[in-house]
Image (tube, helix red, strand yellow):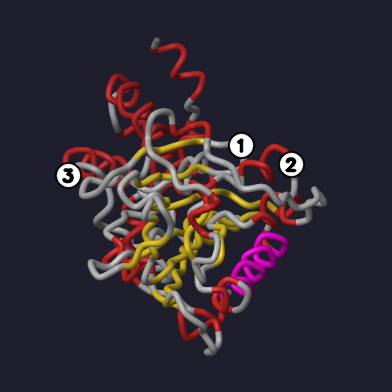
């Protein structure tokens, strides 16, 4: 083993590694609140004080040969390991690369504890169905630039979701002459990349009673904006659904719940940049600009009781959900 480390850690290589590592230590932000100050001195992020003192003691040594060869064979591998850990775990988020956390199914919210929930996965989207309301708690999907430019013809037939098993379902007839549109949560236009996805978007588990002026006006404009974002940045993660108050109305023979509001939250992962924003619209005609209805994701979470994007690392989730800048969208 000594021979192996003696070959791999020559004095010249050792000196170079020490200089690189020292530079690295002085250029990492002090904590997550300093994410946008990349040249703050770095002192507080080393995982344990024990390793911190050992590393700094070694860095202060002007020449490796002043230390015993046996100590170096023990410390050198640790230095390499910590160097790699710092690169992947301590880099700033405007700055944290996509590879630093998994993006598969990143749009799926945390499980809901205070209401009925059955999660159903379809080709183009995933939904949480509420068998008491007969509408979804949320519908989530990832929309890519290619999918946003799909050409599959729009379906016209609303059907019962075969994934409901024995749960009660709303029917298309419940909406007839109700004064409300069958409002898609996952828009048909976002599912036009696949015949199967298009067909599934017309399941009654993906629709809610929606004011016609909202469905065909401001809500439609927001859906179009989401597609433009996907086309510009390559992809966007979307979660949307109803907000139901205690004084809600119902429609149809099956007493389908009429939402009081609707929400939509967006997550953008573009290279090293991560951002999120939310929107809340009352279930009525909305005449104000889109920016008027914009909210932080934290605000939407407080109102809906749903935890969005829980798969994000906590320090990233906490930062991007606390604030928003509509001009960036």
Asked where in the image residue 247 lies, by quadrant, the reply is bottom left
Please tell me which residue lies in front, 316 or 124.
124
Q: Earlier in the sequence, mark 2 or mark 1?
A: 1
Q: Within the image, what quadrant is residue 242 found in?
A: bottom left
**Residue name at image x 71 percent, y 64 percent:** 232
The label on residue 49 is 3
Asked if residue 56 can be seen in this view, the reply is no
Q: Position of residue 39 (x, y in %)?
A: 42, 68
Work out how far the residue at label 1 is from the one at label 3, CA to CA, in angstroms.
49 Å
Q: Within 10 Å of the Cα at label 1, are there few (<14), some (14-19), or many (20+) other Cα atoms?
A: some
Left or right of 149, for residue 229: left
Q: Which one is earlier in the sequence, the residue at label 3 or at label 2?
A: 3
The disc, 1 or 3, on the residue closer to the chain's N-terminal end is 3
Element assignment for label 3: helix
Q: Nearer the viewer, residue 61 or 306?
A: 306
Could you say which quadrant of the image residue 214 lies in? bottom right
Pointer 2 residue:
194
Q: Which residues are magenta?
A: 219-232
How many marks on residues?
Answer: 3
Given residues 226 and 182, the one toward you in this image is 182
Q: Is residue 298 magenta?
A: no
Identify the secondary structure beneath mark 2.
Answer: loop
Question: Which residue, given by chain and number where applicable, does mark 1 sit on?
Answer: 123
User: Which residue shows up at 53% across the image and 52% down it?
Assistant: 173
């Amino acid at each position: 083993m000594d021979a192996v480390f003696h070959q791999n850690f020559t004095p010249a290589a050792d000196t170079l590694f020490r200089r690189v590592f020292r530079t690295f230590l002085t250029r990492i932000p002090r904590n997550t609140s300093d994410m946008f100050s990349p040249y703050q001195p770095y002192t507080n992020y080393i995982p344990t004080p024990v390793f911190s003192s050992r590393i700094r003691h070694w860095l202060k040594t002007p020449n490796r040969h002043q230390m015993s060869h046996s100590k170096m064979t023990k410390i050198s591998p640790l230095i390499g390991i910590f160097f790699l850990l710092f690169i992947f775990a301590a880099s700033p988020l405007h700055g944290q690369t996509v590879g630093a956390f998994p993006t598969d199914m990143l749009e799926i919210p945390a499980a809901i504890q205070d209401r009925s929930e059955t999660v159903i996965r379809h080709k183009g989207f995933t939904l949480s169905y509420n068998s008491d309301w007969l509408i979804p708690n949320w519908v989530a999907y990832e929309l890519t630039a290619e999918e946003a430019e799909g050409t599959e013809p729009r379906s016209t037939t609303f059907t019962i979701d075969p994934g409901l098993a024995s749960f009660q379902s709303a029917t298309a007839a419940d909406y007839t002459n109700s004064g409300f549109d069958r409002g898609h949560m996952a828009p048909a236009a976002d599912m036009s990349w696949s015949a199967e996805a298009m067909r599934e978007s017309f399941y009654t588990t993906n629709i809610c009673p929606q004011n016609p002026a909202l469905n065909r006006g401001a809500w439609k404009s927001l859906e179009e904006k989401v597609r433009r974002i996907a086309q510009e940045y390559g992809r966007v993660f979307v979660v949307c659904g109803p907000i139901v108050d205690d004084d809600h109305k119902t429609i149809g023979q099956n007493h389908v719940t009429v939402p009081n509001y609707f929400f939509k939250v967006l997550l953008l992962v573009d290279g090293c940049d991560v951002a999120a924003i939310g929107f809340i619209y009352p279930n009525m005609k909305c005449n104000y600009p889109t920016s008027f209805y914009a909210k932080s994701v934290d605000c939407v979470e407080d109102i809906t009781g749903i935890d969005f994007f829980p798969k994000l690392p906590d320090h990233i989730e906490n930062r991007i959900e606390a604030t928003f800048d509509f001009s960036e969208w």
